[in-house]
Image (tube, rainbow, N blue to C red):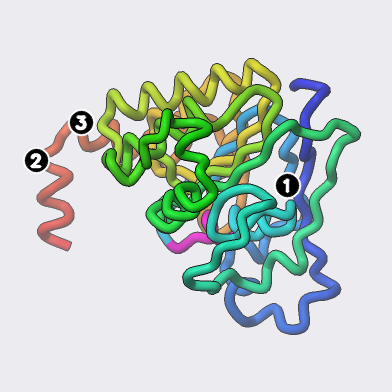
Amino acid sequence: MRDDLYVTSLSIDWEGVPERGVYPFAVPAIASIETLDLASSITFFCGENGTGKSTLLEALSVAYGLNPEGGTRNYTFSVHDDHSELCDHVRLLKSIFRPRDSFFVRSDTLFNLISEMDVLEDDRRYFGGRSLHSVSHGEGILALVSRRFGGGGFYVLDEPETGLSQLGQVALLAEIVRLAQASSQFVIATHSPILLTAPGAVIYQFDDEVREVDLRQTMEWDALNRFLDDPEGMLEEFLDG
C-alpha cells in the first residue's frame, strides 16, 4: 500500500438517509456498505449489471467534487442530470496529499464529455487539435487515459473497457498501471477480467453485499474461464434457460 494516496476510504452516512427502502439505498450491495477501504493505487468494483457499481462510483465522483457526467471539477456541462441522491450521503476520507489532477470518465456519457472538451479546446491542449469525435469510442477512452491523464492524479473510471478489443484492454491496463506507478490513484468499475489482473489491485465484488475478493474469485474471471473451457456447453445453458 502506498502512503501517498488521495482518498483512503468511503463510507455512507446512513443516519442521514431519510428512507432506506428506496433506490439506490435499497440496492443490496449498497445497503451492505458501512465503510470501504480505498487505500490502494487501483481499486476495482466488479459484479453483475444492476448491482450498484456505477451508482456508487458516480456518488464517489460527485462527493469528490467532479462533474457527475464526466470531466474535472471545472466541467459544468449537463445533458441529462439523473445522478442519484447517494452522493449526498457518501463521506470520503481524504489524506493530506492532494492530486495534481482529477477526472471522471463514464462510458455512457463519453460523447457529451468529448463535446465539452472540444468547447474548452482541450483537444488542442492534449490531442494535437484533433477531436476525439474523430476516433472510435474505445480509441477515445485510450487517448484520454494515455494523453490527458498524468502522474499524481485521482481518476474514476466507469467501464472504461467499453469499445476496446482484448488487446486494446491490455493497452489500457498498461496505461493504468503506468500511471499508478507514477503516484496516481484509480477507482474503476469494470466487467473486464483483463483489467482486473492489475498487479496489487484491490477488488470488490458487488452482489448481495460488497466483499473483497481475489481475481480468481470474481464472477468475471469465472465466467470467462467457464466459457473458454466449454463455449458450446455454456451457450446451451443460456439457450435452454
Q: Label 3 amino acid?
A: Leu
Q: Position of residue 142 (x, y in %)?
A: 40, 32
Q: Position of residue 23 (x, y in %)?
A: 58, 77
Residue 79, compared with residue 129, is above or below; it is below
Residue 174, compared with residue 106, is above or below; it is above
Residue 104, compared with residue 241, is above or below; it is above
Q: Is residue 232 visible?
A: yes
Query: Element type at marker 1?
Result: strand
Q: Label 1 amino acid?
A: Leu
Specify the segment rendered in magenta. Answer: 50-55
Residue at image x 72%, y 83%? 19
Residue at image x 67%, y 52%? 74
Instruction: Give the foreground label among 2 and 1.
Output: 1
Badge 3: residue crowd in 10 Å (few <14, some 14–19, many ≥20): few
Left/right placement of residue 145 relative to residue 220 reads: right
Numbered circles on residues, count: 3
Q: Quadrant of residue 137?
A: top left
Query: Element type at marker 2?
Result: helix
Q: Position of residue 17 (x, y in %)?
A: 77, 76
Left/right placement of residue 41 relative to residue 117 reads: right
Residue 36's tag is 1
Disc 3 to disc 1, how far (Cα)?
33 Å
Residue at mark 2: 232
Residue at image x 45%, y 63%? 50
